[in-house]
Image (cartoon, grey):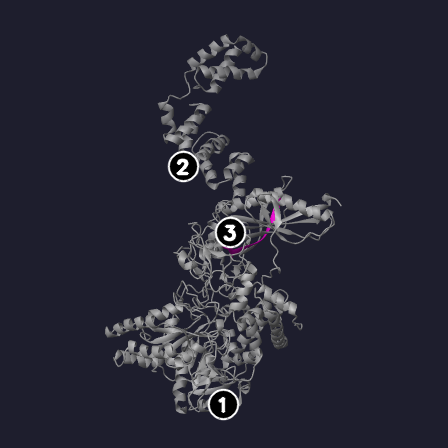
């Protein structure tokens, strides 16, 4: 028995909280105060006689997510009760969609381990409600129902993933799409986006799937990776000893980076799914689907491909700029207003501007420095008015003082030296001062020119166009 | 429909699912009761239902393409005192159970 | 006690007043001879009566129900007023919110005498399934008032209120109305909001009033059938406009459908009365009797006692003692659940939860729950076909009159007790409206019959009931 005889088979279920104002079945606020039990009403605390009413916004977001993932949206959806007992589930059942979920048969393209494109099938997307939160303190437990009734969509993939790397790519891309389309805030530490991983080892030469284990409630990509590695090893250890892998649900322990079995209940729960009699089926028209589709922003994959094509960006640059749709927008707007090549504009936005934004913990949407201001600066570079080095400093000042590029360059006299006579004079002086270097250059060692350019920049206090100096030196040495 | 033999194991299993503790004597009582009811329900075997859609609520027959939806607006929640006033045990603004459970 | 309409006229003419009437009601309610009341709301009711009185003095009554005393089955949630569902589990439960029907009635100016008892969580047909004590039949204290809305029927019959709100899931208002010689009306499913009505079986429950005659019930229906966005399953958005149309009603021709095989299932004395009633009605020029057949009704008990407990098993899962309700002391979570539910829920409730859990469980749900739902469709179709031939269906309410109290009667098996509901459950399964009307007579326990209408024919059904009442007056 060889480890290579087996392949890893992974399916992932993601629970994403939706960006609605109110909860799925009642009008209590979603998000907002953390003060315990401050966002609870009789409906979400399941008082006798209460009934659910579906939030229109949940419905819209769920369709949006379905369209963004290329799913078929069902023309008629209904809800079902999933029955089990837990203190964070006050009704004693969760309202979910078991029989007729809102979306099915979607796809998400990822990169496999060999960097080739791979299609992961999405089985379905269903609308659900989140549970409350329980914590234990010493020898008792406390329950806070603020989160109970928060709308969720559960996105279920087919078991098409084969490794931790693939799983991570899937999750990052899925996360990106859902955040992009505004469906979820995707803040994993806050529990907006949680993953359950189902894993089994399957003999490569057999059709039959191995017994799978489920690791629930992973809320960071790193934990997903570690959990997959741990589970793969744990399964293999059991298999190579000839033992059966038990079908069980496990939790990830963030301290030991391992998984442990969820306390086994005395009887496995049979959820006894049946149609939710307190809700009517919901009809989804073509019109509705089309109006939501019209509202969809350009999705990350499409944007990356387009940026690479339209602007000649590298994949890395296109991916980085597309990580936030507002970042990509900023880039594109800037490109339109400057003659500096797009690839260079990309670098300025990705590197210099983002450095400032991260340093000040700001958001690209809300900084005072807008594309037109950046474009002004970049035009100065393109027109050889200032050097790249100086421009970096100007950018920082623009950010801090909100003065324009022009203003700063003028006030501080930062413009490149355009007096060619002065450049000539400095070049000639340096040639005389450094005869060995000139000889080496003439002998073919071209790179020594950089030293001479550097010396010239020093003399000119950085206010010279290195290209001009370089050309002047070349010309003079050539003579 | 096959005839169901209601055993005490089946009764215990159902009681577990329903989280109801049954005394020994009650198990026997429920066993007899369920058996007699299920025996009576066998009359449904006589009814041909192949291909028939189940009717789970009258609304299936009478809802006329209207969707029952609510605008996504937030409203005031109940005061925490009201939320907790009927519980047997509370602490730190939360429902309290004297037992350690898996955190969620 | 006078009926609502007459009382309203007397208030207008100042022949009596809301406060006077209420005080008489409170005296009876507090004596509680039939054990109707769990909670009497003296202070609240008096305050409401005084306000009503002022409105009549100013000539500005809010509705026909202004100043009219009523009671609520303890399945209706009333903010701040103890609501027990007839259960030990909710012994000390004070709701933090107001149910919709309770609010509509409060807004109409009616005065709440109190919360009346019922079979626990609405489960039962004799009102003996409750720790708050059996409720006695006002016509014969050795007999039951019927259930599950026994408290409602007893409270009206003993004159402690003019009308009472009950709930009807399988006959829980029609049966006690019949047992106590009153009039009860179960609206079409989706007519009255269920928000604030403690759920038993969600696809079967409807709030249903008990009163003295159809006009009274019409006045109540106008108020309680208002649109409520908090109930997704309320299909009717415009409230019923009834009182005036009843009063202005012309006699219309009525085709009354009768399935003779149904009558044959009744006790001889009940059968005789029904046949005599039909005979009398058929002599009236406006009434034509038509033969119909409802072949799947014989399966109604199996269908109902699989579907209702299944839904109930989920609706009652919230009674776990964690967030509200009585909680048994235990060392771990599982025991908190098991002991709380084992000890604070009654026997009949536990039986139905067990039955329902079984019907939905893996390996059995197709054979039981799904099958029952399929036969439910066939029962609904039986009614569709019948209504092609007739306007309303005439049937028994139950095969026997009011049962004797448990201690006095021969022991009955669960099935035998469930069979009391044979004629009433199919109506809930199909979501149809139905009236329980008494047959006037000088007997201690009068006869009665059920009048079933097609879906959403509530207004016409009440008008027809009103018309039949007038015709049947000739029998008394």
- Give yes or no for residue A356 being in the magenta stretch: no
Chain of the residue on which disc 1 is drawn = C
* Residue ID for mark 1: C275
Do the CB atoms of the residues marked 2 and 1 lie less than 8 Å apart? no
SS for dot 2: loop
Relative to the observer, which residue lies in front, C433 or C456? Answer: C433
* Mark 2 and mark 1: Cα distance apart in space: 87 Å
* Whether residue A471 is situated above or below residue C355 in the rendered picture: above
- Give yes or no for residue A136 being in the magenta stretch: yes
**Same-chain status of marks 3 and 2:** yes
Q: Is residue A163 visible?
A: no
* Residue ID for mark 3: A135
* Residue B54, x across and y down, in percent: 57, 69
* Mark 1 and mark 3: Cα distance apart in space: 67 Å
**Same-chain status of marks 2 and 1:** no
* Residue ID for mark 2: A367
* Residue B45, x across and y down, in percent: 63, 75
User: Badge 2 local density, few (<14 within 10 Å), some, or many (20+)?
Assistant: few
The label nearer to you, 3 versus 2, is: 3
């Amino acid at each position: 028995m060889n480890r290579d005889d087996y392949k890893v088979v992974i399916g992932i279920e993601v629970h994403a909280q939706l960006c609605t104002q109110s909860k799925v079945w009642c009008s209590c606020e979603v998000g907002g105060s953390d003060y315990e039990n401050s966002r609870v009403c009789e409906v979400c605390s399941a008082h006798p006689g209460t009934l659910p009413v579906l939030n229109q916004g949940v419905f819209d977001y769920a369709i949006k997510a379905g369209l963004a993932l290329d799913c078929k949206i069902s023309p008629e959806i209904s809800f079902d009760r999933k029955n089990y007992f837990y203190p964070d589930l006050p009704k004693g059942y969760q309202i979910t969609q078991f029989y007729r979920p809102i979306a099915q048969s979607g796809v998400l393209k990822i990169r496999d381990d060999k960097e080739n494109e791979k299609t992961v099938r999405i089985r379905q997307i269903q609308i659900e409600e989140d549970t409350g939160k329980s914590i234990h303190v010493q020898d008792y437990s406390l329950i806070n129902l603020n989160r109970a009734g928060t709308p969720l969509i559960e996105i279920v993939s087919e078991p098409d993933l084969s490794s931790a790397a693939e799983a991570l790519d899937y999750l990052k891309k899925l996360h990106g799409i859902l955040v992009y389309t505004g469906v979820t805030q995707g803040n994993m530490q806050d529990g907006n986006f949680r993953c359950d991983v189902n894993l089994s080892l399957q003999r490569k030469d057999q059709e039959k799937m191995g017994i799978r284990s489920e690791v629930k409630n992973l809320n960071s990509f790193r934990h997903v990776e570690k959990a997959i590695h741990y589970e793969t090893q744990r399964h293999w250890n059991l298999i190579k000893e000839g033992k059966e892998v038990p079908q069980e649900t496990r939790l990830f322990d963030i301290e030991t980076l391992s998984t442990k079995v969820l306390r086994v209940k005395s009887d496995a729960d049979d959820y006894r799914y049946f149609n939710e009699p307190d809700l009517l089926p919901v009809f989804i028209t073509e019109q509705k689907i089309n109006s939501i589709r019209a509202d969809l922003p350009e999705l990350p994959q499409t944007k990356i491909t387009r940026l690479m094509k339209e602007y000649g960006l590298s994949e890395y640059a296109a991916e980085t700029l597309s990580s936030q749709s507002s970042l990509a927008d900023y880039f594109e707007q800037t490109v339109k207003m400057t003659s500096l090549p797009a690839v260079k504009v990309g670098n300025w936005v990705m590197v210099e501007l983002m450095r400032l934004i991260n340093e000040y913990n700001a958001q690209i949407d809300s900084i005072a420095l807008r594309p037109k201001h950046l474009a002004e600066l970049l035009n100065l570079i393109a027109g050889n008015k200032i050097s790249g080095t100086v421009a970096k400093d100007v950018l920082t000042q623009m950010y801090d003082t909100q003065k324009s590029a022009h203003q700063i360059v003028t006030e501080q006299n930062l413009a490149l030296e355009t007096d060619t006579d002065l450049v000539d004079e400095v070049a000639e002086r340096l040639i005389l001062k450094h005869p060995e270097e000139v000889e080496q250059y003439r002998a073919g060692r071209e790179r020594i020119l950089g030293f001479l350019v550097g010396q010239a920049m020093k003399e000119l206090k950085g206010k010279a166009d290195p290209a001009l100096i370089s050309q002047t030196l070349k010309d003079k040495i050539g003579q | 429909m096959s005839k169901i033999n209601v055993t005490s194991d089946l009764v215990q299993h159902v009681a577990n699912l329903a989280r109801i503790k049954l005394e020994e004597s009650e198990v026997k009582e429920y066993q007899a009761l369920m058996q007699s009811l299920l025996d009576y329900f066998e009359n449904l075997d006589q009814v041909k239902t192949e291909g028939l859609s189940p009717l789970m609520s009258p609304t299936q027959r009478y809802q006329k393409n209207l969707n029952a939806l609510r605008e996504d607006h937030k409203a005031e929640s109940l005061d925490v005192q009201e939320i907790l006033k009927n519980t047997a045990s509370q602490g730190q603004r939360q429902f309290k159970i004297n037992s350690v459970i898996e955190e969620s | 006690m006078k009926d609502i309409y007459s009382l309203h006229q007397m208030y207008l003419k100042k022949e009596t007043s809301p406060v006077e009437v209420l005080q008489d009601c409170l005296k009876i309610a507090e004596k509680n001879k039939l054990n109707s009341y769990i909670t009497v709301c003296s202070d609240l009711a008096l305050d409401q009566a005084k306000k009503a009185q002022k409105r009549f003095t100013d000539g500005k009554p809010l509705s026909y129900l202004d100043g009219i005393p009523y009671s609520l089955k303890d399945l209706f949630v009333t903010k701040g007023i103890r609501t027990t569902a007839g259960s030990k589990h909710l012994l000390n439960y004070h709701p933090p919110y107001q149910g919709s029907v309770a609010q509509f009635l409060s807004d109409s100016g009616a005065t709440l005498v109190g919360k009346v008892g019922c079979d626990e969580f609405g489960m039962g047909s004799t009102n003996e399934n409750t720790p708050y004590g059996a409720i006695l039949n006002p016509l014969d204290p050795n007999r039951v008032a019927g259930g599950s809305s026994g408290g409602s029927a007893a409270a009206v019959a003993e004159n402690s209120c003019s009308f009472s709100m009950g709930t009807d899931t399988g006959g829980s208002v029609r049966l006690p109305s019949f047992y106590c010689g009153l009039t009860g009306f179960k609206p079409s499913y989706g007519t009255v909001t269920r928000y604030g009505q403690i759920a038993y079986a969600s696809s079967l429950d409807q709030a249903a009033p008990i009163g003295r005659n159809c006009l009274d019930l019409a006045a109540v229906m106008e108020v309680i059938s208002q649109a409520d966005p908090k109930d997704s399953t309320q299909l009717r958005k415009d409230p019923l406009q009834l009182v005036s149309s009843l009063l202005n009603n012309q006699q219309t021709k009525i085709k009354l459908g009768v399935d003779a095989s149904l009558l044959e299932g009744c006790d001889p004395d009940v059968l005789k009365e029904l046949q005599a009633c039909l005979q009398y009605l058929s002599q009236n020029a406006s009434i034509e009797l038509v033969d119909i057949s409802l072949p799947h009704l014989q399966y109604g008990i199996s269908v109902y006692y699989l579907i209702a407990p299944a839904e109930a098993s989920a609706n009652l899962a919230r009674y776990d003692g964690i967030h509200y309700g009585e909680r048994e002391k235990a060392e771990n979570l599982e025991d908190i659940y098991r002991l709380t539910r084992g000890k604070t829920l009654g026997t009949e409730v536990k039986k139905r939860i067990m039955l329902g859990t079984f019907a939905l469980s893996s390996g059995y749900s197709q054979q039981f729950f799904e099958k029952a739902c399929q036969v439910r469709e066939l029962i609904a179709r039986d009614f569709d076909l019948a209504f092609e031939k007739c306007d309303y269906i005439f049937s028994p309410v139950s095969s026997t009159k009011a049962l004797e109290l448990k201690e006095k009667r021969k022991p009955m098996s669960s099935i035998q007790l469930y069979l009391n509901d044979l004629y009433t459950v199919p109506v809930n399964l199909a979501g149809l409206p139905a009236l329980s009307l008494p047959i006037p007579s000088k007997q201690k326990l009068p006869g009665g019959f059920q009048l079933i209408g097609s879906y959403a024919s509530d207004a016409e059904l009440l008008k027809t009931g009103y018309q039949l009442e007038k015709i049947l007056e000739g029998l008394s």
